[in-house]
Amino acid sequence: MTIRRFKPAVKIAVLLFLTAAATGAGYQLWRRCVPPPQSMPPAQALPVEPSGTSTETTEPEPSGSIRRENCYTFLLAASDQVSGNADVIMLATYDMAQQTLGIVSIPRDTLLEPGRFSTFPKLNSVYLQGPEQLRAAVSDLTGIPIDYYVTVNPRGFVELVDTLGGITFDVPIHMSYEDPHQDLSIHFEPGIQHLSGADALKVCRLRQNSDGTLAYPDYDIGRTRTQQQMLSAILKKALLNPQKLPEYMEIFNKNVQTDLSPTTILWFIEPALGLENIQSATLPGNSEVTCGSARYCYQLYPQETLELLNQLVNPYEAPLKMEDLTIYQISTEQNDNNV
């Protein structure tokens, strides 16, 4: 597993560089001298070693395998604060030429074939084996090789929002939850309000209220939609405050695991400052599927998923085809027998 932790000398140099030249002529000269980041070739598969099985390759070669120029893909993930499983899983594609960022959220309970990446058939459990294994699983699922992964712990999320001076956000629903074991108290009414970092994290975490009712009528789809909207609001505010780049880098260094090098991060910074077109959606599916002993698995709808991937995150010149995806399906009869 690749974990970037910048050495003090590198960190100081990066911070000085960002402060002095991130939007200036020196930065432009540097970009002309440094080659652009490399994207993952379609035929390059990531090794996967599920428990009890031999190593296999998982990234298919997409039917349209010519990558768009200056188009990069990222896995964005965050763990929950209790189990260590992934709580947020997103696939993002940044088209530098078109200045667009497409994000698809993959529900944490998305159904995987048991034993393919984990003995437990939910995508979030793969994260316990590390971000590279989760990247392999998401690539296998979507047919899209992922160039870089970025995983953030909850502390980093809170610190970033607080560095921005909080975030103004339209809380979509009534929220009322108490958990003394976690020292967690979530109480919000619907409407636009200014949230601290800790409050923003609470809004993103809520799954159900203390009375046992689901927080959202569409369960994790609604929760994922709120997370997308929060991420978009944070990104936009961060990009409007480039003078805080040194602080962003400090937060990044303390709270993020990634295979992005400092040079690659610098390459992306200046174009990202002009990013305005951010679109996001959640992969559609059925959240009430049972697989063995695992209940409430989220089984993706193949055709709708394919259409959404092509619309928002396909980095290729040609559309993805159904055979590029690996979507595990349980028949209605199987599911009825499992219930």
Image: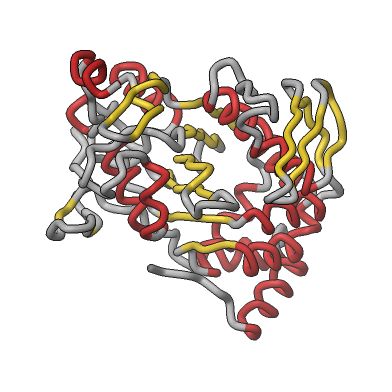
* Farthest bottom residue in view: 9
Q: Position of residue 324 (x, y in %)?
A: 21, 33
Q: Position of residue 47 (x, y in %)?
A: 22, 59
Quarter assignment of residue 36: bottom left
- Name the residue nearer the viewer: 302 or 40: 302
- Name the residue nearer the viewer: 30 or 239: 239
Q: Residue sitting at 25 percent across and 33 percent down?
A: 292
Q: Residue sitting at 73 percent across and 74 percent down?
A: 16
Q: Residue sitting at 45 percent across and 48 percent down?
A: 74
Asked whether, in this view, residue 230 is left or right of residue 199, the answer is left
Q: Quadrant of the N terminus?
A: bottom left
Asked whether, in this view, residue 252 is left or right of residue 303, the answer is right
Q: Residue sitting at 69 percent across and 50 percent down?
A: 181
Quarter assignment of residue 308: top left
Q: Position of residue 339 (x, y in %)?
A: 30, 21
Q: Position of residue 75 (x, y in %)?
A: 45, 48
Report the number of numbered marks: 0
Name the colouring of the figure: secondary structure
Asked whether, in this view, residue 186 is left or right of residue 31, the answer is right
